[in-house]
Image (tube, coloured by chain):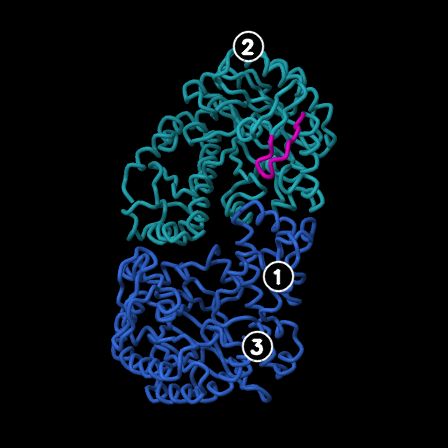
Chain colours: A cyan, B blue
Amino acid sequence: MSDPALTYELFKTDAITHARLGRVTTRHGVFDTPAFMPVGTQGTIKGQLPSLIAETGAQCILANTYHLMLRPGEKVVAELGDLHRFMAWPGPILTDSGGFQVFSLGDINKISDDGVTFKSHVDGAMVHLTPARSMQVQNDLGADIIMAFDECPDPTKPREYQLQAVDRTLRWAELCIESHARKRDQTLFGIVQGGVDLELRSHCAMRLIELDFPGYAVGGLAVGEGFDAMKTVLAHTTPLLPKDKPRYLMGVGFPRDIVEAVSHGIDMFDCVMPTRNGRNAYAFTRDGAIRIRNARFTRDTGPIEEDCDCYACRTFTRGAIRHYFFAGEMLGPVLVSLHNTRFYQRLMADIRTAIAGGTFDEFRRNDLRARLGPAVHAKDETDRD
Amino acid sequence: MSDPALTYELFKTDAITHARLGRVTTRHGVFDTPAFMPVGTQGTIKGQLPSLIAETGAQCILANTYHLMLRPGEKVVAELGDLHRFMAWPGPILTDSGGFQVFSLGDINKISDDGVTFKSHVDGAMVHLTPARSMQVQNDLGADIIMAFDECPDPTKPREYQLQAVDRTLRWAELCIESHARKRDQTLFGIVQGGVDLELRSHCAMRLIELDFPGYAVGGLAVGEGFDAMKTVLAHTTPLLPKDKPRYLMGVGFPRDIVEAVSHGIDMFDCVMPTRNGRNAYAFTRDGAIRIRNARFTRDTGPIEEDCDCYACRTFTRGAIRHYFFAGEMLGPVLVSLHNTRFYQRLMADIRTAIAGGTFDEFRRNDLRARLGPAVHAKDETDRD
């Protein structure tokens, strides 16, 4: 069944891998896939002006339901003209359901079949989040793509708990479909859970597909299960999902993870890594991450990354940016976050070009960025300031 | 004698007041006067990208010798390609001498006829600053306009001390001229001190004029003497200065102070107020300052200031900006600082237009901005969040 608020076009599937080239059209414009969505947790991509984010090539951005419902409140955002006006982002926006943040950030009081009761990190008030409430909040926020309210359980919990959590996620998925009040404007994605249990993943995926969501996410990965387990789950789960609908891997990740996931047929990604690392003076480069605070950059007249075309690299020396970090000036975090955001968008653009040109398998085996995982950080960490 | 690195053109003097319309040409471009220079204390205008500062209409910016000599060090800035490259500001830059900061921020160990010994606020090291050292630092930094090293004494000190400080300032001015090693690239301004003692101001001005500086500053104002005292000193001192050279009132101030000083013939201003107030959520508007954190802006869909053309006002609602402050997001300080910077540049542009059109006296008497002094802040402070 076609969705009134979203169209997915699949232009090409790679001959060797499962990588897909496509495009998603929403009521606020299009984004090319595979796509990386910068994260604007509290309604702003930290330290970045929307005009500069658009200049990095980002076409769709993400905001967090959990944070915005607590502050300033979804009704305030709605009164200010919805999330597009609020964030000054006229293009496509996706909101998550709040589920992941409740389970990872909230001081949880109680999980029941009804929903979750948690303590607000803003003012300590008790908040009750249910599938219906998540839908109402996301309807008020007004993003183009909204996510079903799911349970993302601790992967170390026993199988019985995982099974119970998946069943809850499935019941909640149905309730979300029922509660979603803006189907003509906003597209609801289902979320496949099941941890590292492939049987559970199959069960969850199959049942969600029966519910005929216009798009599917793979949730519950990049939560500590490790790269190999993530690969196994993606190789198993992604092929189960309908080919004519977009597939979104939530909260991932390092360039290595993205390239791997694209090879299994994932179309959409989001992660705080470009901005979080940027604020901590870690800059992504093709050869690995560098720590701009490092003493070796004190007199470095080069840009953060040679050949990068971002505003930071076109405009500032490594030496000046290092100084801004030491002097406690906002410009340091702003510039490195901007560079990292552009780094991710270039990666996605190059992935799309490789798929289009039939060279994605070569890209995945040979491009230096396909190796950038957590180790690249540890390496530089040992350098002295 | 004409200066190899700076030209001042006086286009018009107001028929009623002493306001002057002019233009300063440096080796890095021109700025129209009366001009307001945003302050980039540590080599960055706090939270602002240079491209956006240029968009506000600012043509010349300021950086602080005291801060940059301590961190990252003037030699590092020089190795990174001088202050223009370091700050990514290709246009005119002015550096102060470090004197004011030493006296206001430094933990002073000793003032002598030779110079000042103080404790660095960065690492606690003892630093000796002399006229020759200030010149060497400013020569290394490479700004277009550099300032003589002066003593800016506490205005409450007795007359004998003020006299001694002025004599020191005059001796140091000669030493600065002797030490200045880049006369072809950088223009050295002398600074008239003397506190609120008009006789001392005359003495200092006359002696500096004999030294034939290419430009003159009035220092030691806006340090707590009050608006009326400032007016009196300006009315006395400014007419003593040569008409064919630019005049700079250091560290001033509120819009009211600027309009007043322009009427006495001042051409250049700098102040941290637009950015400092912006970081604290105070936004300048024609009708007075508003505190964006105020609860009345929670659902306000308007811009910071109606009819303002700055990026912040074109792009974001007051409600969203208020949220960013409460959520601790950088974007709040960034946007209000940007607005305030544009507010000051519009004020200067309107002042120049009024002088050009022969309506400056009317402007000064009727424009709402000519009343914006410290009181506008106190008013809003009483509102509740």
Q: Residues within 10 Å of mark 2 (few under 14, many from 20)?
A: few
Q: Are marks 1 and 2 on the same chain?
A: no
Q: Is residue A16 visible?
A: no
Q: Is residue B81 left or right of residue A315?
A: left
Per the model, the C-alpha gap separating discs 1 and 3 is 22 Å
Residue at 40% across / 27% down in the picture?
A364
Q: Are marks 2 and 3 on the same chain?
A: no
Chain letter of the residue carrying label 3: B
Q: Position of residue A301 (x, y in %)?
A: 31, 53
Q: Is residue A29 left or right of residue A35?
A: right
Label 3 residue SS: helix
Is A108 part of what is drawn in magenta? Answer: no
Q: Position of residue B271 (x, y in %)?
A: 48, 68
Chain letter of the residue carrying label 2: A
Residue B360 position by quadrant: bottom right
Q: Which residue is mark 3?
A: B259
Q: Position of residue B249 (x, y in %)?
A: 46, 76
The amino acid on which the numbered mark 1 sits, given as a three-letter code, is: Asp
Residue at 55% across / 67% down in the picture?
B344
Residue A145 position by quadrant: top right
Per the model, the C-alpha gap separating discs 1 and 2 is 60 Å
Q: Residues within 10 Å of mark 1 (few under 14, many from 20)?
A: some
**Front position among marks 2 and 3:** 2
Q: Which residue is mark 1?
A: B309
Q: Is there CB contact under 8 Å for labels 1 and 3?
A: no
The amino acid on which the numbered mark 2 sits, given as a three-letter code, is: Glu
Q: Which residue is mark 2?
A: A160
